[in-house]
Image (cartoon, grey):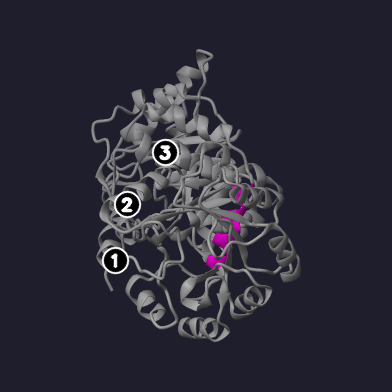
Amino acid sequence: MSEDILAKIVRMRREDISRLGLNFGIEIPEKRRGGHTEFLGNAGAILEVKRASPSKGDIAPDLDPVALATTYAEAHAQAVSVLTEGNFFKGSLRDLIAVADLMERRRQQGLHACAVLRKDFLLFEDEIDIAYRCGADAVLLIARILDDEQLVRMAKRAQSFDMQAFVEVREVDDLRKLKVVTEALGESAAKTIVAGVNSRDLATFHTDPLVPASVRSKLPAKAVFESGILCPADATYARNLGFTGILVGEAVAKNPPLAKEVVHAFESGSENARGKFWKKFAERKAAQKAGPLVKICGITRDEDGKLAAELGADMLGLVFSTTKRLTTEEFVRSFAEKIGPNRPILVGVITDPESVEGKTAIKLAKEGVLDAVQFHGVAPEAEYSDLPHYCAARVGEESDFDKVVALRKNGEPRILLDAKVEGIPGGTGKTIPENLLREKAGELPLWLAGGITPENVGAIVEKFHPELVDVSSGVEDAPGIKNSEKLKALFAALS
């Protein structure tokens, strides 16, 4: 089995330590030279001094750490993260010392000073001492590379210096370790431990913004969304999920003026219904053992919705657009009450938010009768940013993926891809051309709609491994009239 990226980083780091020592041959201060700023004492952004990464190569190889950290401080970041790993990130303890000295000068001048985080793949307690002497206020401890005992020892060492331990988690066993270290520190854990969940898998360096959503409810009050924040809208999304902080690297290291926008977007956002929806979906996905989640769309009858729910549907779509599958407010209210609390996620599908039908769905989502609104073929305006929602893009040719890219840049963590047929908003029975999906879909997990049937769903899942399949006409006798045998055949094909 080939060595993954994380294992390679750790192996090479151990080799460097064996050859150069824990200070990597760099002269460090005998004593700490400055004061202390609590890491994430207030909600806000942690911005990174980052030259390179294993996945992107050089990001900002010629950056001046002091100049960049000054930009971050002037943008009122809460903390500066300084990467000190040299092989893959081209960082150094010299960067840490320089940034910490800058923040001490700013404190003495009465200017805003950020806390300083040493971000590295730390393995030994004595590395905490070195970070402290270099001026760090907090240290990153990656649960994935530390066993229980070592994680506890390192967190306690940080505590002894009045430093925060920024414990990074991602996998199930990481969460167990977080609980172990929190219990070991007792009442002092609330001040010592800050949890971070990385949307990037350090083994593969693939990023998924739904991973932090899936575990937010399992983290302590003070928690950070790490990686994948590329624009202000992504920062707003993280805040909507209820995170206390965001850690942003590549985007601001490459484009320092973006720092102020990202900080403002996060600090002006709030935990809201949109975040609640994405947490609910992400938790449902995390609990899924195998195969895609299933949305059955175009529900117009109680019996169809109930059967789909019994068979295992994760989402049910109710259409608020002038098609033959159009539903009514009265039906949706009644159905939501009848189907009970452990129901699938209920989604109102709209094609025009200004229409009577669209406004009705938005009202029902605001009231909580619907769990979310699907903006189908339209991008939501800013006034709907707090509304629980996701977007569907109709694609039939390469240029249509420009809309998908634009939606992603607007902070949408998932986009449903539906087959495009002119004049018909959805439920066409047509599939998206396979070559388009292979060439243009990108790295985010796929949500697929269009022409999915009991007969072809197995092949679609095998070829594209979608996270969600959205089925409407493929299980119908007529628009809005589901066929119970076809529904059963669909779920049998997925089992």
Q: Which mark is residue 231?
A: 3
Q: Label 1: which residue?
A: 433
Residue 243 lies, in percent from the top left, at 58, 45
Looking at the image, can residue 181 be seen? no
- Labels 1 and 3: the sequence-earlier one: 3
Reply yes or no: does residue 129 show up in magenta: no
Q: Earlier in the sequence, mark 3 or mark 2?
A: 3
What residue does disc 2 label?
400
Binning the other alpha carbons within 10 Å of mark 2 as few (below 14), some (14 to 19) or many (20 upward) gives some
Q: Residue at x 55, y 81 (%)?
A: 483
- At label 2, the amino acid type is Asp
* Residue drawn at x 39%, y 75% as measured from the top left: 461
Number of dots carrying numbers: 3
Residue type at tag 3: Cys
Left or right relative to 194: residue 91:
left
Disc 2, SS: helix
Question: Which structural element holds mark 3?
Answer: loop
Nearer the observer, 234 or 334 = 334
Q: Is residue 202 above or below residue 273?
A: below
N-terminal-most mark, 2 or 1 = 2
Q: Quadrant of residue 41?
A: top right
In 3D space, how far apart are the residues under numbered discs 1 and 3 (Cα atoms)?
30 Å
Q: Magenta part of the protein: which range?
A: 273-286
Callout 1, which amino acid?
A: Pro
Residue 469 percent location from the top left of the image: 46, 69
Magenta span main SS: helix
Q: 282 above or below 19?
A: below
Residue 279 lies, in percent from the top left, at 59, 56
Q: Vertically, is 315 above or below 200?
A: below
Q: Secondary structure at mark 1?
A: loop
Q: Residue at x 46, y 84 (%)?
A: 493
